[in-house]
Image (cartoon, rainbow, N blue to C red):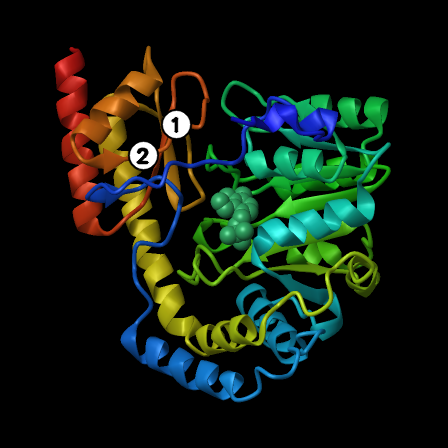
Amino acid sequence: MTRIDDLPIRDELRGKSPYGAPQLDVPVRLNTNENPYPLPEPLVQRIGERVTEAARHLNRYPDRDAVELRTELAAYLTKTTGHEVGLANVWAANGSNEIIQQLLQTFGGPGRTAIGFDPSYSMHSIISRGTGTGWISGARNDDFTIDAERAVEQIRELAPDVVFICSPNNPTGTAVGRETVLELYEAAPGMVVVDEAYNEFSHGDSLLDLLDGRPNLVITRTMSKAFGAAGLRLGYLAADPAVVDAVQLVRLPYHLSSVTQATALAALEYTDTLLAYVQQLKGERDRLVTELEALGCEVTASDANFVQFGRFEDAHATWQRLLDHGVLVRDNGVPGFLRVTAGTPDENDAFLDAIRATVKENS
Ligand code: PMP
């Protein structure tokens, strides 16, 4: 049997594993930070209408510049953050992963480097590798916050071309203060990408207002979490119009299908309904924190739709025990910790019952 390493693949890909959150068929799946609520039925109907209309024109390529969609995304950002952005500031792609890839193709690449502060979203380093960008793993404090002083030192010394700041951070849930972002931006010689995939779940503000006068700053967002549309694959960025122009140099022509654009536009019509689910999930997230702490767990403060909890002597054994109870959470490899996504109240009850049983078995 031919193995990957028998092929003439690039050296930096040898022996590496692909991104792989297990997709297991278990009753309670709280492992990939999805929104547990299916889209409301009227929205499903509206998607049907919009997609039907798009289907009538599928003989043609889609709008390559996704003008209507970017205009609506800009309106959404303006409405929810109070900071005005327009079409020229916004770019969209198939998930924020593709946005990150386009950013690294544009501002990273062979001979260049990117830095992130680990533990953080693993795709920042995986996409760096995939685009030939060298990866620098910066450290966090014991409480998973970013040590701004140390980070600034590292940035000054290593001069990375791209700095990733994930806020709220996956997998820890930690929000990064605007002071820290500004300090890192001042130190960075290149681009600073703030990954706000979970912003809507945060207690604090978006950093969108920092874009004014900072052409090297990029904010990335997604419809996978707050909009409950992970299956749609729609991510976007807000930045100076020059950044939007720059990523055009690497994007594939017609990368966003007409069906994707139509579906995303329908979802944006239901913003208010979808954001009401976000409020409910924030309440459930806070309940998970309270209940886990009451159980004696160490819980990392969370601004996201998930909670990191521990500290376990053998986190993977605890992960397996929860799975034996029919509950799938995530082992991100952070020593002593696991991550649970806020689900529906019933799913969270099932998780809490399972973790209570597990803690009892342990004591
Ligand atoms: N950024 C972060 C921090 C994430 O956790 C995720 C999804 N797990 C993404 C980006 C990618 O999201 P998507 O490609 O679905 O937009």
**Residue 284 horizontal side relative to residue 145, left or right:** left
> Is residue 148 shown to the viewer in this render?
no
The extreme front residue here reads 1
Residue 330 in the image, given as x and y percentages of width and height? 37, 32
**Residue 206 horizontal side relative to residue 186, left or right:** left
Question: Label 2 is placed on what type of residue?
Answer: Val
Q: Residues within 10 Å of mark 1 (few under 14, many from 20)?
A: many
Taking the spot 36% from the left edge, 27% from the top edge, the residue there is 338
The answer to whether the residue labelled 1 contacts the one labelled 2, judged by CB atoms less than 8 Å apart, is yes
> Is residue 153 shown to the viewer in this render?
yes
The residue wearing badge 2 is 329
The residue wearing badge 1 is 331
Residue 121 in the image, given as x and y percentages of width and height? 55, 36
C-alpha span from label 1 to label 2: 7 Å
Q: Residues within 10 Å of mark 2 (few under 14, many from 20)?
A: many
Question: Label 1 is placed on what type of residue?
Answer: Asp
Identify whether 329 is placed above or below 1. Answer: below
The quarter of the displayed image where residue 340 is located: top left
**Residue 132 horizontal side relative to residue 354, left or right:** right
The quarter of the displayed image where residue 276 is located: bottom left
Residue in the foreground of this view, choosing between 47 and 336: 47
